[in-house]
Image: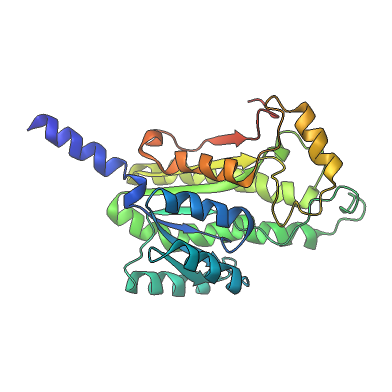
């Protein structure tokens, strides 16, 4: 009986991915859609959040099947998330796991980026509102159910650029750097409820909506200086996100895992 009780305690602390309900913000396209596919292939129920990309989100949900639904909402608007949470509760799709992937519209093109003497506070605020305010809204609204169940897995998406800003995308990097801080502080506060909060950071991914404007020679250069001699794909990255939701990471929280082929070494 003692052995069985230990097994039950471990199960409650670490829900298998196939028993999780995963909300991915900004999942209608790009990296978010790949993350949704990775979780779906492991048997999870999927909530595809989108702001404007209805057609892409609907198409993704249709392709995944009955265990995937769409949920419209701007994470910068707390009222949107409150309504979304009500709808999900009514549909018996209460998130156990949240992947905060959404970013404000951005293009990774070093030649066209704003230089520091051209940058306005509004440029930074546009990124901060999605990466940080959006995450705060998520924590405010969705962690209540996690606390009640004493289980939750939260993963934020960062960047290796705040460790090695080879191209100074000032506003994007600033938004993500603050997100790492909030990831770590919330991990401390939520840990007693068996809720882990971690970040996974990529480099230049091939290819997302944000990186489609990146010149091909930049991808070639990244490949040449990366130990694995390849640019990380969205599927490479999405599969790595599974770790922080899996039972194997049940004792890991407040961490930032860099998935970029070894370009940035911690």
Q: Position of residue 15 (x, y in %)?
A: 31, 45
Residue 225 visible: yes
Task: Tell me where residue 261 appears, x and y as whole percent.
Answer: 65, 31
| Residue 184 visible in the picture | no
Q: How is the image coloured?
A: rainbow
Lateral position of residue 211 relative to residue 258, left or right: right
Q: In what quadrant of the picture does the N terminus appear?
A: top left
Instruction: Locate residue 252, reporting x and y percent.
Output: 43, 34
Q: How many marks?
A: 0
Q: Residue most toward the left?
A: 1
Q: Is residue 36 left or right of residue 7?
A: right
Q: Nearer the viewer, residue 5 or 28?
A: 28
The answer to whether residue 236 is left or right of residue 86 is: right
Dividing the picture into quadrants, the one containing residue 25 is bottom right
Which residue shows up at 38% across the image and 63% down it?
67
Q: Position of residue 204 (x, y in %)?
A: 72, 42
Residue 172 position (above or below residue 2): below
Q: Quadrant of the C terminus?
A: top right
**Toward which corner of the image does residue 2 lie, by quadrant?**
top left
């Amino acid at each position: 009986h003692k052995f069985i009780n230990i097994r039950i305690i471990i199960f409650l602390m670490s829900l298998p991915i196939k028993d999780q309900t995963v909300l991915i913000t900004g999942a209608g396209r790009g990296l978010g859609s790949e993350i949704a596919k990775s979780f779906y292939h492991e048997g999870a129920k999927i909530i595809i959040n989108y702001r404007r990309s209805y057609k892409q989100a609907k198409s993704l949900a249709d392709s995944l099947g009955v265990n995937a639904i769409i949920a419209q909402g701007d994470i910068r608007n707390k009222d949107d998330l409150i309504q979304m949470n009500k709808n999900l509760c009514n549909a018996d799709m209460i998130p156990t796991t949240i992947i905060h992937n959404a970013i404000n519209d951005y293009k990774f093109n070093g030649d066209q980026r704003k230089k520091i003497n051209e940058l306005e506070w509004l440029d930074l605020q546009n990124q901060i509102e999605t990466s940080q305010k959006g995450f705060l809204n998520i924590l405010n609204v969705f962690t209540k159910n996690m606390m009640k169940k004493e289980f939750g897995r939260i993963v934020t998406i960062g960047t290796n650029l705040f460790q090695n800003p080879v191209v100074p995308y000032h506003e994007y990097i600033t938004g993500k750097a603050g997100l790492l801080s909030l990831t770590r502080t919330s991990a401390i506060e939520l840990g007693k409820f068996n809720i882990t909060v971690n970040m996974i950071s990529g480099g230049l991914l091939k290819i997302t909506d944000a990186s489609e404007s990146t010149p091909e020679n930049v991808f070639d250069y990244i490949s040449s200086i990366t130990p694995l001699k390849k640019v990380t794909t969205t599927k490479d990255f999405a599969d790595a996100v599974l770790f922080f939701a899996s039972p194997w990471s049940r004792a890991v929280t407040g961490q930032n895992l860099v998935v970029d082929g070894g370009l940035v070494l911690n």
